[in-house]
Image (cartoon, coloured by chain):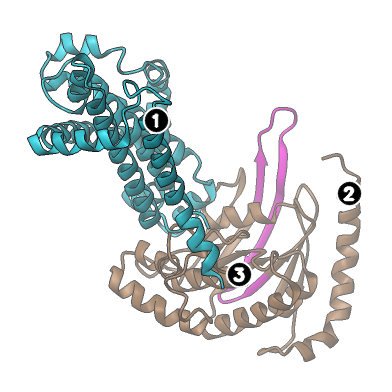
Chain colours: A cyan, B brown
Amino acid sequence: MNDRPRKASRLAPAATFIGFLVTWEVAVRLGWISALFFPSPGAIWISLVKLIGTGALISATGVTLMRFAAGLIAGSVLGALLGLMMGWWPPLNAFLDPFVAAIYPIPKIAIFPLLMIMFGIGEGSKFAAILLTAFFPMLVTSLAGVRQISRIYFEVGKNYGARGTTVFTHILLPGSLPSILAGVRLSTNIAFVIAISVEMISARNGLGVLLFLSWQTFRVSDLYAVLLVIALWGLLLNYAIAYLTRALVPWVGE
Amino acid sequence: MSFECAGIGKVFPAAQTDIVALKDVSFVVEDGQFVCMVGPSGCGKTTLLRLIAGLDYPTAGRIAFDLPRKSGQLRAAMVFQHFGLFPWMTVLDNVAFGLKMRGESRKVSHLRATEFMGRVGLAGFGGSYPHQLSGGMRQRVAIARAFLADPEILLMDEPFGMLDAQTRIVMQEELLSLWQGRQHTVIYVTHDIEEAIFLGDRILVMSGRPGTLLADIPIDIPRPRERSNVLGKVTDIRLRVWNMLRDEVLRELEMPS
């Protein structure tokens, strides 16, 4: 009895999606919308298969993901560590907070030209831009994560003899983990956006380049095919983080 | 003797006038004694527990501990009013926390925690998280954690205050049977006079703010105690305590806070 509505709710999005594609295809074929701006799903599919066939799409995806992962991992590890330390040791927070407050809101794409001057137009500046993008949200969320741990848990720890590193491993880190994982989600999403953005500005390969090239050569269905791949990766990353969150902080929620 | 409080005073500095939480509180606790503390709310009972636990310092007087400690033994473990269980640890890890902090290996502390959990009705809950348990079960976890840490002194801050009346009665009896097996020194704060009479060897009655010691009443009901033979003696002790507290409570009520 119970799984009928559940099955229905799982099928509903798929049905909506298929319905949407069919309507789109029909609308293009009947000339209701311009194939120039909205190539039909069939045409996009053909572009996709072609781009995969030449290997262009796969190598571009690989390059972008590598850049993104390197910057994300470096930036979020550094950001989380510094955020935790700032939460643990208030003087450090008092000293660094003005800098964080000033730099955090700057869109990292805006300082990309500066980074290219500093680190050259090769991988260095791209790595730095993605790293900085991931760094600040991680710093801010892990700092907030430490701040919201109730004082009572530190007192319990102290009362039972927890000192120094045990306070860090048993209270500080797990207590701020839900907030840190919210930070991972945030960092991942903007770091992915920035990875593709910097590629559009200055790169020889990657999804951003493919996207830009499709525009310059006016191959609109290629453009859509690349966008599709980007969207799918975004979806995949967010599902992975949701899964990771459930696995790492089972005590939160329900 | 377990420890002595001598002329304890505690003042919290505040913007307008300093808050005098405790004033000249002196008493001696014998080794293995179950001491209950009652008093109107805000009378500094929790503050006194925190001082004994070493979580805060008195601004006057001193607390002298008498027992030579076994190496690594905790002086005082606290059962907090709101349980103070770590939400990110399983029940098993919570119970084993004190042992781990004393330097026991993960394996040994888990083994001993599992064994102890069986004795306090927590068998099979090791993998659960605190938020999945009822209030009574959570407090069992907090009590198991404190007992297993094997401190010299157990400090309990209204541990059953948030439980319903029936659960509280069951928990009181469980607590007594645990204590009778081990004979820790216990300082138990409560606002329930009847609970104090059922559990304690003596009752320290505190006044309203600033907290001072009003009376020290011995409870000479033989142990092990049955609720039925306690009930008869309750009335007169209760009246005595209540007569003392009544004025304090009334005074508190009329005081601007």
Farthest residue to the left: give it. A54
Residue B253 has which mark? Answer: 2
The verdict on a common chain for dots 1 and 2 is no
The residue positioned 47% from the left and 49% from the top of the image is A154
Disc 3 packing (10 Å; few <14; some 14–19; many ≥20): few
Q: Nearer the viewer, mark 1 or mark 2?
A: 1
The magenta region covers B7-35
Question: In this rendering, would A231 be left or right of A46?
Answer: right
Residue ID for mark 3: B134
Residue A128 has which mark? Answer: none
Residue at disc 1, secondary structure: loop
Q: Is residue A123 magenta?
A: no
In which quadrant will I find the N terminus of chain A? bottom right
Q: Chain of mark 3?
A: B
The verdict on a common chain for dots 1 and 3 is no
Whether residue B200 is visible to the viewer of this picture, yes or no, is no
